């Protein structure tokens, strides 16, 4: 709704003397600069936490948890050395691509879009609702959902219930030799995302395709070791996420304080003439 010009012109503004206006402006310039600098430091800390989180995942799914394990050349340039007892297999031979299309209008299954998956964490974002137009892909609990549109965003999610997802995502189901949670973390690793992103086509809406992704290698420790790695990463990433949540809460409080400070200063609720 647009505010009528007459209503805007009728609003009365407090007008202190010019010298006091300048004092208030200098005070707010100084204080908001301090707050903004503190927020910038906290955002930089968030970036460092995200980098450490991604690096931890990438190392664990390609090197395992035993730093003393004998290593061998994987034969794949972007993977480098891997534990000697690990196997590598093309992804399409260790998984099944599920390509079941359902009209979302005719289904009671919950629908998620790529906007409901948080980049680089695999978490589902709650509270957002969207509707599918036309056909959507059906998935089951335990399937890994991989966003093929703009893969550099790293939209990877391990489904916890049956549902529907946009056709811009691949639905990948692990076979017995591959733990689905390990697969989720493997597909969230920086090297995997980067190599998939290098294959995209289309400049405005870059997409990856299964023909390329399915031919990429997936590493296969034995299933118990995969589960141990996945559980380790579950625990460690939750620690990172808890730290990030506290920092985000602090940033929100600083932004609220900034807004309140400006409001109180320009309305005379605080006297800054002596400050």
Image (cartoon, rainbow, N blue to C red):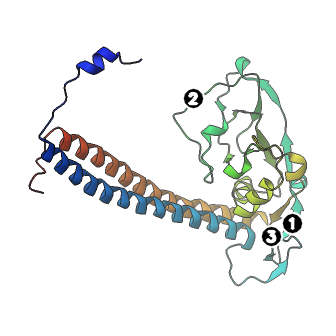
Residue, disc 3: 79
- Whether residue 250 is visible, yes or no, is yes
- Relative to residue 220, is residue 46 drawn left or right? left
Rendered residue at 19%/29% (across/down): 13
Residue, disc 2: 129
Instruction: Tell me which numbered mark, 3 or 1, is placed earlier along the sequence.
Output: 3
Quadrant where the N terminus sits is: top left
Residue 6 coordinates in the image, percent (x, y): 30, 15
Instruction: Tell me which numbered mark, 2 or 1, is placed earlier along the sequence.
Output: 1
Rendered residue at 69%/32% (across/down): 163
Instruction: Tell me which numbered mark, 3 or 2, is placed earlier along the sequence.
Output: 3
Quadrant where the C terminus sits is: bottom left
Residue 155 coordinates in the image, percent (x, y): 67, 47
Q: Which label was assigned to residue 88? A: 1
Q: Secondary structure at mark 3?
A: loop
Is residue 15 shown above or below 212?
above
Q: Secondary structure at mark 2?
A: loop
| Label 1 crowd bin: few (<14), some (14–19), many (20+), radius 10 Å | some
Given contact means CB atoms under 8 Å apart, are the residues at marks 3 and 1 in contact? Answer: yes
């Amino acid at each position: 709704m647009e505010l009528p010009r007459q209503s805007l012109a009728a609003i009365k503004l407090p007008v202190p003397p010019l010298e006091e206006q300048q004092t208030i402006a200098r005070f707010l310039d100084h204080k908001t600069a301090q707050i903004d600098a503190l927020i910038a430091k906290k955002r930089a800390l968030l970036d460092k936490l995200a980098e450490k989180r991604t690096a931890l995942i990438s190392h664990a799914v390609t090197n395992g948890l035993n730093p003393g394990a004998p290593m061998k050349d994987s034969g794949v340039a972007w993977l480098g050395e891997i534990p000697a007892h690990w196997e590598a297999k093309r992804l399409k031979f260790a998984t099944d691509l599920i390509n079941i299309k359902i009209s979302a209008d005719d289904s009671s299954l919950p629908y998620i879009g790529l906007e409901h998956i948080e980049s680089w964490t695999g978490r589902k974002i709650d509270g957002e609702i969207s509707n599918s137009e036309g056909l959507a892909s059906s998935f089951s609990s335990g399937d890994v959902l991989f966003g093929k549109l703009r893969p550099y965003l790293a939209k990877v999610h391990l489904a916890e219930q049956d549902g529907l997802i946009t056709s811009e995502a691949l639905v990948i189901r692990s076979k017995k030799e591959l733990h689905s949670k390990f697969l989720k973390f493997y597909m969230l690793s920086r090297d995997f995302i980067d190599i998939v992103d290098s294959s995209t086509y289309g400049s405005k809406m870059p997409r990856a395709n299964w023909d390329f992704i399915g031919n990429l290698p997936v590493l296969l420790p034995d299933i118990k070791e995969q589960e141990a790695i996945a559980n380790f990463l579950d625990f460690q990433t939750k620690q990172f996420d808890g730290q990030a949540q506290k920092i985000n809460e602090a940033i929100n409080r600083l932004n609220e304080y900034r807004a309140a400070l400006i409001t109180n200063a320009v309305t005379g609720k605080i006297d800054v003439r002596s400050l």
